[in-house]
Amino acid sequence: MELVQQLTEALGAECVLSHAEAAQRIASNWVGAENLNCRALLLPRNTAEVSTALKICHAAKQPVVPHGGLTNVVGGVLTQGHEIALSLERMNAIEAVDEANRTATVQAGVVLQELQNQLQPRGLFFPLDLGAKGSCMIGGNISTNAGGLQALRYGVMRNLVLGLEVVLADGTIITSMNQLLKNNAGYDLKHLFIGSEGTLGVITRAVLKLEDVPLSKNTAYIALNSFAQACDFLSFAKKTLGHTLSTYELMWQDYYQLMTSLPSRYAPPLPQDHAYYVLLEAQGYHPENDQKLFQETLERAFESGLIADACLAQSQQELDWFWGIREQVDFIFSVHQPVFLFDVSLSISNMETYTQEIAKGLQKVWPDVFLYVFGHMGDGNLHLFVSCGQNDQATRHQVEEIVFNPLTAIGGSITAEHGVGLEKKAWLHLSRNPAEIALMKSLKAALDPAGILNPGKIF
Amino acid sequence: MELVQQLTEALGAECVLSHAEAAQRIASNWVGAENLNCRALLLPRNTAEVSTALKICHAAKQPVVPHGGLTNVVGGVLTQGHEIALSLERMNAIEAVDEANRTATVQAGVVLQELQNQLQPRGLFFPLDLGAKGSCMIGGNISTNAGGLQALRYGVMRNLVLGLEVVLADGTIITSMNQLLKNNAGYDLKHLFIGSEGTLGVITRAVLKLEDVPLSKNTAYIALNSFAQACDFLSFAKKTLGHTLSTYELMWQDYYQLMTSLPSRYAPPLPQDHAYYVLLEAQGYHPENDQKLFQETLERAFESGLIADACLAQSQQELDWFWGIREQVDFIFSVHQPVFLFDVSLSISNMETYTQEIAKGLQKVWPDVFLYVFGHMGDGNLHLFVSCGQNDQATRHQVEEIVFNPLTAIGGSITAEHGVGLEKKAWLHLSRNPAEIALMKSLKAALDPAGILNPGKIF
């Protein structure tokens, strides 16, 4: 029997979209996405159906690409015409919220924003926050080990997952739905699947750690005259604000100017003539004290010359405005096309010289290049948007060379949070040595000997 | 050539102790340890020598048991006469401390306390803290994913390791000494080796995350009249003290009475007639504020009836006294022999009924049984010391049955932080299902196909 027909008989017609039906959908939620091109699109309703589908595909050595919210920016969800896409979108139930133990049990297809919405009225929250929250799904967040805007305080996705259910390439279901904070009973299997980009198994369910909804939120823009100030103020803010410090987003002047000048809809909260800007946020449980501490922190920093200027958000409207400047990065794509996006990781102590070197390197080849830099400074994670007017493969490669090559010498990484996918696999050797890559391949061979899961991604 | 001779020629005689020489040493730092019984004891001085040794042992299918500080309490380091012990004790260099990026690069044989001593004058600290700190080594802390007394605030060892160097069973060196907080360049290999008890590779070096030395420490004993109070006060303390809360150690009355009555050297800081006691500690960077907040927290808790009594440590001497009551658990062994030690993990909401059930079950068989319970309540981790006057295998098994069996129904774990080793492997199936154990075995087969690394441990 033909494979798609076999899948249709096993799962039911409503769970299998043909090549032509799937082609009505887009291949990715990312800028410039084409239509989905795959042999079939599977829409299983539960773990057993995921297992059935994988068993059939495994027997036929049929490549399968797991799909979540399709917000991946490194080509991690892209399919070729002979590959089957397996979307978890129908597995979108929040199965349980345990208020006493601060855990949520969810299916992989739950949209991050939807989880946050459901938790809010119970006074709980899941602390992953990223620009794509309205579309991205928990399964994708886990398989890419998402980072985002509050990792400084709460850690990355790996730190927020307690248990997982995963279906292996051959259909074996591994239900490892640990609810405990500490559990050393044998190997901690979940870490294999977190961040392995769907190449070792398909995540179907998870147990997530929750927090109480913070009762206070204090947010400010800070202007700084030098990178040294950005470093010193980060140290100061960490010590002063302690664990309430949840966001320290650094923006280079070019980025801030672009996002706060027409045709952007945002006005500048602070004058545009400073070298760096920080979006600072602290969250806590003692509204009165927290606000006092936040204001005192800024006053003391200003008085001691640690910062050049500051401006506090005084209303929800101002909060949206402040965050919009940092989050609405799509605006760059409306001003510049094409744009190459990077997500590098490096020590804070290397950030200034690294970005200067990149800028010089790019300007040497493209004197009119646009380079916008911002990122999660506290995590050592910068995003770079590069637009040099060209979009061909050779140009892309040349830009990548300039951005990635200096990372090896400083122990940096070609990806802090976006992952490798298709786009960065040619550069993996800059951040991982041959022995590490060989061990990754051994694991891949052990868990997916037929190589059917998201083939060609990562390595 | 005979294997030990081959190792001696490859490593030099000073790195290979014979069976007889090794037998001068003890097999474990734990109570009642016998002398070391092994085919030979290897003492490599660097990673290359570890690799050489494993290459030779791998070719000969020679079992190897990695040794660190020998403080393991579940038989994880025990050897049989035909096995070779490989001690990392000579690899005890602190290779680098990066003050700007808050990392330390250390060899596996560094003693935890020694690392803390070296960091202190630089204003830095490594936040793992456990009773065995004077002997336990970083490599062992990593391979067992140690927890300890401050996991509530800083997380377990897994959260404190950035990078690792590991030698695989066949001698392959995997140098994955990541220094970055975020790095999604391929699989995060370190998690395979953290907590796998030396069965997948020998850890030789690590990059550790450091913190600034806290500038304030506030410590108190709290008396509570019910378990419900212990829960409510924990929630209250978490919200009030926020991230400064570093320790919340709960002690049942029996334990507290034992540790604060003659022949114990400790007097009771609070009267002995309360149902529960908590050793509470908070650490921060604002001495004046932190002390005020700590005192206010206790005052408000007392006034609102959340706690029955409280007593603050006012000097280093009192601090040592307070901590001694919690840490000097060896005292139990001087009063009772034999003692069976347990380390279970469970939701806080199940703790009271679980311990009552255990007590009842034990008393039914041994009416005069001693049961001492205390633990890291905030982490969901309890330690139970059981002494029923007998020490034979059948008794041990019966006690284990009573302690472990109820865990399955409540999703608990047979080990929160001690690991499985030899002692708990018969019970692994209570906390892990057959699919999970099968996957663990697949990983073992993939990484150590000859099964030479710490054979017979975990499963």
Image (tube, coloured by chain):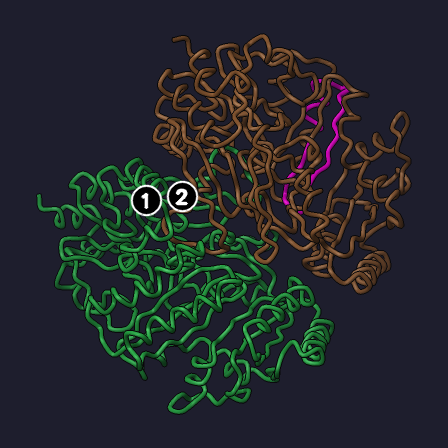
Chain colours: A green, B brown
Quarter of the image for the N terminus of chain A: give it.
top left
Residue range corresponding to the magenta coloring: B359-383
Judging depth in this view, the residue of A204 and B295 nearest the camera is B295
Would you name the residue on which mark 1 appears?
A200
For residue A141, above or below residue B422: below
**Residue B367 location (% of width, % of height):** 76, 19
Judging depth in this view, the residue of A286 and A358 nearest the camera is A358
Question: Which amino acid does the dot numbered 1 rest on?
Answer: Leu
Judging depth in this view, the residue of B452 and A393 nearest the camera is A393
Look at the numbered disc 1 and give the secondary structure of its residue. Answer: loop
Q: Earlier in the sequence, mark 2 or mark 1?
A: 2
Q: Residues within 10 Å of mark 2 (few under 14, many from 20)?
A: some
Look at the numbered disc 2 and give the secondary structure of its residue. Answer: helix
Question: Can you tell which quarter of the image residue B402 is in?
Answer: top right
Task: Answer left or right for A173 relative to A24.
Answer: right
Question: Which amino acid does the dot numbered 2 rest on?
Answer: Leu
| B368 magenta-colored | yes
For residue B407, above or below residue B5: below
For residue A157, above or below residue A213: above
For residue A127, above or below residue A319: above
Question: Can you tell which quarter of the image residue B161 is in?
Answer: top right
Residue A131 in view (yes/no): yes
Would you name the residue on which mark 2 appears?
A192
**Residue B55 location (% of width, % of height):** 39, 23
Q: Which residue is drawn at the image coordinates 50% and 78% (left, top)?
A: A323
Chain letter of disc 2 in the image: A
Task: Answer left or right for A95 relative to B128.
Answer: left
| B360 magenta-colored | yes
Looking at the picture, do discs 2 and 1 lie on one chain? yes
Say which mark, if any, is on residue A410: none
Chain letter of disc 1 in the image: A
